[in-house]
Image (cartoon, grey):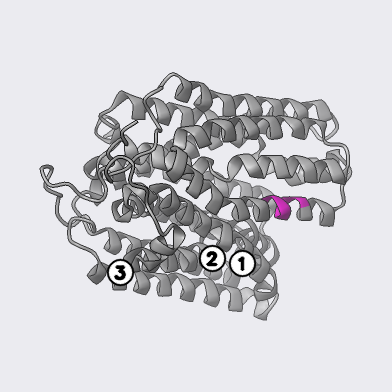
Amino acid sequence: MLRRALPRRSEARRILVGTLLSAIGRGLTLPFLFIYLTDVRGLTDARAGLVIGWYGAVTLALSPLGGTLIDRFGARRVVLPCLLIEAVGTGSLALVHSTGSAFLVATVIAVGSSAIWSGQNTILASLTDDGERQRVFGLNFALLNLGIGIGGMTSGAIVDIGRPVTFQMIYLLDAVSYLMPALILLTLPGVGGRISSAPAGERSSGGYLTVLRDRPFRRLVIFGLILTTCGYAQIEVGFTAYAVRVVEVSPRVVAWALAANTVMIVLAQLVVIRRLEGRSRTGALAVVGAVFAAAWLILGAAGVVGTSNAIVAALGVMACSAIFGFGETMLSPVMPALTNALATDELRGRYNAMSSMIFGVSGVIGPVTAGPLIGAADGKVWVAAVVGGCLLASLVALSLRRLLAPEVDGRVAADPGTPTRSEPTPATA
């Protein structure tokens, strides 16, 4: 299954290696930023939260510009400097000593990360055809989670609040990890140039207005906003708060649950990729909404059990996280593959940037709404809201099916002799 999921072109395989290496560095630091800023550098909880929120806001604000630059100059010329900026910013976290310096470093990191995800997706799309793209994006997601898991387990054995140097070490290692995909991209001089199916010298027009006029993609964006707001965006705040305050499990159980999520993704992704081949992409997205809803229902049931049976409650929390991870294995290959199947070569960077912005917008809405909802009726209002939202997303996904051609929806294989919107053609120099 791994051999089947690997892209045919060696350049794409090397890009995937870069994903794994940078993900290991990301996993080293991902769980510890708030703790580092508060317990090691002495920022108050409120100021640390503002720093993290500021990073998200700047990243979201700059993402549209990143998509425009990718289409105009090519992903290579955007991703390379962004990786270097991200490395400098992440390494500089080791030197943070005040609120002002934390805001400055967060701004630098946000500038770097604003176009990396959309740029790398654009590069992968340019190195694959529509027949293999779904498998490659799924494998990319599995490698991302594998790397984060390896990094998280490693840093868990290293960091010590009483020894600030241990935190400085992992941030410097994270900075080095961002240089790995940059070095790999430097060894691939023909990868990441501007792609266009238009005649040489003819520039695309319309920009993001053209992207938003694409009715199927607009429906896909609506689906993504609903699903991620009621799904992904609830993991860091809603899931954790409900598990600790309502189900009354220990933070250690939450950590085990998140580990179960990663294990599920790594073990199930290749199997899911294979099972999705030849099946409707919109149908798969609808199933994702149902799976996410089932996960939240199980968490709600664990809240009803509560302290009356601590073991069952803990198992419910871990089952929720694992089932949620299974849903992720279907979403991760289908969403970017469908985005790039709808995109034109002239606007591919903007399509990918708009897709990545879905997570940024929901990342603002989800945490803000989770707290008040969990505080109402012992969390029952929150459970009802996220379950209902996930099921609504499933209905939106099903409504998208009639807007797509069968080959775009993945129900039939596209004729390899017929050009499609999803086949990038290098622009003439």
Q: Is residue 403 left or right of residue 292?
A: left
Q: Quadrant of the N terminus?
A: top left
State if disc 1 and disc 2 touch (CB < 8 Å): yes
Residue shown at 39% from the left, 62% from the top: 210
Marks 3 and 2 in Cβ contact (< 8 Å): no
Q: Which secondary structure type mostly characterizes the magenta part of the structure?
A: helix
Q: In this orientation, which residue lies closer to the viewer: 215 or 239?
A: 215
Q: Name which residue type carries label 3.
A: Leu
Range of the magenta residues? 51-55
The residue positioned farthest toward the bottom in the image shown: 377
Q: How busy is the neighbourhood of tag 3: few (under 14 within 10 Å), some, or many (20 plus)?
A: many
Q: Amino acid at mark 1?
A: Ile
According to the image, label 3 marks what residue? 400
Residue type, label 2? Thr
Q: Residue at coordinates 76% horizontally, 35% vertically from top-left?
A: 93
Residue 220, located in which quarter of the rendered image?
bottom left
Mark 2 vs 1, N-terminal side: 2
Residue shown at 36% from the left, 42% from the top: 137
Residue at position x 64%, y 30% from top? 87
How many numbered dots are placed on residues in this image?
A: 3
Disc 1 target residue:
365
Q: Residue 91, can we see it?
A: yes
Q: Is residue 156 left or right of residue 21?
A: right
Task: Look at discs 3 and 2 and give the one toward the viewer.
Answer: 3
Residue ranking furthest to the top:
187
**Element carrying mark 1:** helix
Name the mark on residue 77: none
Check disc 3 and report its element: helix, strand or loop: helix
State the mark number for residue 229. 2
Q: Give the camera-side residue of 190 and 242.
A: 190
Q: Quadrant of residue 323?
A: bottom left
The local secondary structure at tag 2 comes to helix
